[in-house]
Amino acid sequence: MLRNVLHRIARKLGSIIALVLLGGLLSATLVRLAPGFDADERELDPSLSAESVNALRHSRAAEHNILLYYTSYLRGAARGDLGVSHALGQPVLTLLRERWPVTARVVGMGLLLAWVLATTLAFSACLWRRPLYEVFGITLSGAFLCIPAAVLALLSVILNAPGYLAIALIVFPKIYRYARNLLAKAYALPHITAARARGLGEVRILAWHVLPITGPQMIALGGITVSIALGASIPVEALCGLPGIGQLAWQAALSRDLPLLVNLTVLVTLVTLLANSGADVMNYMLRPHEPQRGVDLA
Amino acid sequence: MIGRRGCLRLALFLCLAVLCVCGSTLAQSGGELRFCLHSEPKTFDPLLVDDDSSLAVRYLTAGVLIRSNRRTQALEPELAESWKVAKDGKQITFKLRHGITFSDGSPFSSEDVAFTIQRLMDPALHSPTGDAFRSGSGAVSTKIIAPDQISIVFPAAVAGLDRLFDQVAIMSAHSPKKTAAVLGPFMVAEYKAGSTVLLRRNPNYWKKDSQGHRLPYLDSIRLDIQPNRDVEMLRFKRGELDLINVMDSEYFDRLAASSPGLAHDAGASLDSEFMWFNQVANAPIPEYKRAWFRSTNFRRAISQAINRADMSRVVFNGHAQPAVGPVSPANKFWFNSKLQAEPYRPVSALKLLQSDGFHQQSGFLYDKSGNAVEFSIVTNAGNKPRERMAVMVQEDLADLGIKVNVVTLDFPSLIERISQKFNYEAAMLGFRNIDLDPNGQMNIWLSSAENHAWNPQQKSPETAWEAEIDRLMRAQASTADEKKRKESFDRVQEIVADQVPFIYLVNVNALSAVSNAVQGANPVILAPQTFWNAERLTLNATVQASR
Amino acid sequence: MIVARKFAWVVVLAVCAASLAANWLAPTGYAKQFRDAPSAPPSAQHLLGTDELGRDRFARVLYGTRISLLLAPAAALVSTLLAALVGGLAGYLGGIWLRLARGFTDLFLSLPWLFLLITVRALLPLNVSPLVSVVITFFILGLLGWAASARVLSTSADALRNSDFVLQARASGLHGPRLFLVHVLPNLKPVLYAQFWISIPVFILSEANLGILGLGVAEPLPSWGSLLRELEGLISFREEPWRLVPLLLLIVVLTSFQLLLSNEEVTA
């Protein structure tokens, strides 16, 4: 089994590297082809001479051929040089090194809080099976789904609350919705009813009968929520003044900062892939291993 | 013989004397001033500055030869004790102050001025500040007459030459610290990208107040990078910020309602909001639309159909004035006082359109070929007042039967459309004017220039009135006689009012907020509105103690 | 729960009826600017006050409900179907298909789709009608919003592939599309419903944020998203609590829909 797991991990790592490289290239292509790539707001300055305006417009000539740019980027990345941000005039590696701890902390704490909140609500609704809990859970999660992320971020500034609280409030309704449905479906299965009828305690039912059924999907959901939380970090960091990667991403997008965007995409792709692959590997390890009964239908 | 008591008295006397001397040269401790920049400073190289945030940092750290007093608008000697501009406008000679050093202790002399000018005018640098000095082809030469005297010669006359030196930060020719060695009241101590710029007092700043105390009073200035105005306002109300340099009118009114003394309306600023139509010959727009946009009657009619008074009242809560033309009435010398803002005259607008063959049918307007009059206005997303103005224009023109589509775009996409691809019909933007002298607008008015927004880079002027504007702008640039320059530029303003290539909408008031903790503040209309006299600002003792 | 569902029915019917009858119920057009009364508080003339341009907020809520209530669920349906197709099918087929789908989904989640949206805006004519613009916007949101759910679905379908009842169905001679549609897909309902309900408010809010790219509902057409964006400038809710009404309405409507269909989400 260990050999199987190691083999799986090695295969995963290989596919992660391939996907990360592809992600960087696709991101660079999207940015390059989007309108406004060569535009710089300094062109509108009437004090600039025609030569200066032309120089501005051609300052990104090296990035016009995406394949050449990406190849040179990869060569630089192999040497530890991730390029220089156009918007901030600083090496991208320095920027990422300074900022990733902020985002890691905010996203990590936000995710933890979101999962605690969502699973507590979902389990309560399923365990106590009172209509009040159901309505309360639906209303609370619905309310936070409807509030714009920028408003939640602003609220956390008004209340002097930490930024990760805003992320938690953005992410938890999504977790709750999935978790509640998965748990409710599992609890509706006949063998759970039978277990209850036989007097099995709720905690035991949950641990031995419900979680094994819902576990794989919840673990898969865990991987997804990393990506959702990273997306939520953009408005939250921008509004709460947190100098993290989310704030950087928004600035980079608005100024078409190709070096920064490519690196951010590579980073986000890597984190997403690691999170989801981690979930897949965990699912594989937790799955009961019997001689294979089903067949791949491909 | 001096006894023990005598020695003590002498020692005491000497201590007091030393204290008096030190006290007269030591700066007062004024605390740390805090306010926000709305975007990341793009550069700390003072010769490459072109965005508001970098401009703010440059203003606070740079030493300049001549300073334009933001309150009186008069020119004052700074690093230069005196200067003389030659009659032909091609040469300026400076007499420099003595005994000045950069922040790192290296001495200041005419060599540093020469070095700065050479770097400024280097065509490879593409300095926006340097471009303002480019009056003709040929190199700029500097002549060091003495360590405290230098002459700068330009290939052609430069209009408003002395005033331009307000933007030229003198750099050290020899200091190993390069741009970090400054002559201004503050220097950059720390920069955290996306977060803060911390400026500390320059210990070698040359200026003293009337009592001989060294300036600046403040110990430091902390600039937080915060693009969101809501958060900025919140922090100001909480006392975490001391200034809001530029405020939107809705925040101004909220603050004025709760804390009247903190909100300041300095009156009409130099800034204007305006719109224009695309008249580029090969723009990818239908020919019949191009014909509309090129018709002076059409443009005049649109201008008359827009209710500027409503705009000032509704969008800016009365903190704006209907705009007259390219120069704000706040620019007292250059404003053509014979002109007035276009009043709201929808009936007259319709008559003008009818004279061009337009007619109304079932509530819609059609041109003489039967095309329904419909066009789009593009503007930048995220600027709420501008978006609201566009919607008001949409509503005003709907009364004439014209259908207007408001399209908000992100800035790079917008710039690409209006200055590179020209695939737009009408555009609405604002002009942030930091320069009183209209020569800074040369690239807007010359038909061959890049920023001649409605039809740039013409090989030769396509209309007689554009040819006349070209002639007048060149005439005002080629003389140092202010009276002649004013006559020429007055005439430019009259042509613009007549031909309406730009439909000027409003001049926004200079709105700012200053906390009670700040002493010495005197908000004005010229940028930087609230901290133009930063070297003389101080914070009250209570706030200082709490920080 | 029965009482809650009855209340939900009333709310849903009332909101649908009100939005359909907007032409009669609205005291004025949604674009009419009462320039003498911008940002006015509620009054007899303007039940929910006016916005910054003096437009009646009640009228804008009524008309905006039509747009958002129709198009957001449609876009959510598109994203749910795509999630079922990609995630569900890949999990059902297993093997290389599952690995490819997961890789594709992970990549899809990481790319900056903002630039695709900017490009779409550039390709559209500037004078596209507001309604066409909003339909295109929601359609694109539907095309882009499936990936997260597809990932969870693929895991669910993968687990179902080897379950007893699926094996039994195969042994009975059922296979291919019929097996997927009759036995696998219904068991994916919990995730599909979750995806659907989450997507509606997310798309409503995203549509408003896309205004920054020139997409979304164009002025003067209102939408719930643009009404919710008004909240961004609200530093103190105590000053103008009536601005919260669109948010409360959205919460109530969404909750009502979910209460009505909550049983469907968990039964096979």
Image (spheres, coloured by chain):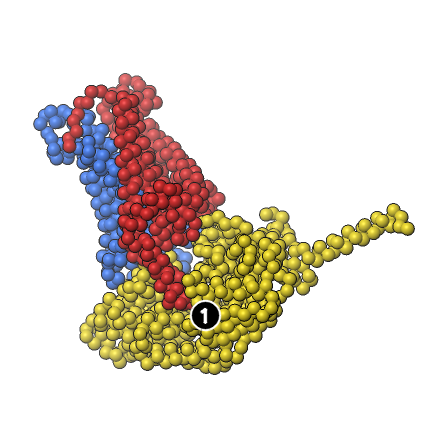
Image coords of residue A95 (percent x, y): 43, 45
Most extreme residue toward the right, as rendered? Answer: B1
Q: Closer to the camera, C28 or B121?
A: B121
Q: Residue at x 59, y 47 (%)?
A: B547
Most extreme residue toward the top, as rendered? Answer: A198
What residue is shown with label 1? B139
Check disc 1 and give the amino acid type.
Answer: Ala
Q: Residue at x 43, y 52 (%)?
A: A89
Q: Chain of mark 1?
A: B
Image coords of residue C176 (percent x, y): 12, 33
Residue B403 picture quarter: bottom left
What is the drawing colour of chain C? blue
Q: Is residue B98 visible?
A: yes
Label 1's element?
Answer: loop
Quarter of the image that includes the N terminus of chain A: top left
Quarter of the image that includes the C terminus of chain A: top left
What is the drawing colour of chain B? yellow
Q: Closer to the camera, A154 or B193?
A: B193
Q: Closer to the camera, A54 or B276?
A: A54
Q: Is residue C243 visible?
A: no
Image coords of residue A78 (percent x, y): 35, 41
Left/right placement of residue B544 relative to residue C135 reads right
Image vertical order of residue B299 relative to residue A294, above or below: below
Image coords of residue B66 (percent x, y): 56, 68
* Label 1: few (<14), some (14–19) or many (≥20) C-alpha neighbours in 10 Å: some
Most extreme residue toward the left, as rendered? Answer: C173
What is the drawing colour of chain A? red
Q: Residue at x 33, y 21 (%)?
A: A204
Q: Residue at x 52, y 49 (%)?
A: B190
Q: Closer to the camera, A185 or C27?
A: A185
